[in-house]
Image (cartoon, coloured by chain):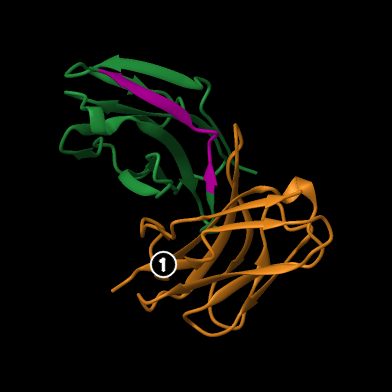
Amino acid sequence: NAGVTQTPKFQVLKTGQSMTLQCAQDMNHNSMYWYRQDPGMGLRLIYYSASEGTTDKGEVPNGYNVSRLNKREFSLRLESAAPSQTSVYFCASRVQGPSYNEQFFGPGTRLTVL
Amino acid sequence: AQTVTQSQPEMSVQEAETVTLSCTYDTSESDYYLFWYKQPPSRQMILVIRQEAYKQQNATENRFSVNFQKAAKSFSLKISDSQLGDAAMYFCAYRGANSKLTFGKGITLSVRP
């Protein structure tokens, strides 16, 4: 049982390049989330998927797209990377149900855009 | 929109002593949940403790406890008998009816041996 996995762990891009961050969970969770963490800003929600087949914008969606490929996988795409997207990205998942259910986080991806 | 405020960016505590981390939040909802997460240098986010707003009793988990003051919208974390392994960044978070987590900016806790 690996929990939430993310690939890659580190990535360096040049401005204008594109890339996809991969996330998978093996806990049969319905809901999945993408966050970014910047110094002094905490974690901010980019996109989330309440269930397979649905996605919604979070607090900071501009410059990103997501795909809920199936129940296990939720990917985050940067079409044209910008230096402002340099950040640590976390994927998380949660079983649908009472709001006290905790979110489980992946190990994060450190992305640098030059 | 809900907001979560952690006004202290850093705190320090002597090993074996007690430290309290502050958190306030703003909401118009009556039913919600509050969480404290720990993020050690490994970056992994770890749930420390959670509190349901409808429960008056403060949550406790071993050396960790909260002081939940609903009227004041305050949710502080107390760490007793601090250990070197408690050194980390701590985030306060809120979840309401929309089921989305809103995080505070975090506080860096250092533990002096």
- Residue situated in front as seen by the camera: B69 or A88: A88
Identify the hue of chain A.
orange
Residue B23's place in the image compared with B55, above or below, is above
Where residue A98 sits, quadrant-wise, is bottom left
- Residue situated in front as seen by the camera: A41 or A96: A41
x, y percent for residue B15: 21, 18
Q: Number of numbered discs present?
A: 1
Tell me the kind of residue under disc 1.
Val
Say which residue appears at 15% left-offset and 38% top-offset: B62
x, y percent for residue A2: 33, 71
Magenta residues?
A: B102-112
Where residue A16 sits, quadrant-wise, is bottom right
Is residue B72 part of the magenta span, yes or no? Answer: no
Pointer 1 residue: A4
Where residue B35 sits, quadrant-wise, is top left
Say which residue appears at 35% left-offset and 68% top-offset: A3
* Chain bearing mark 1: A
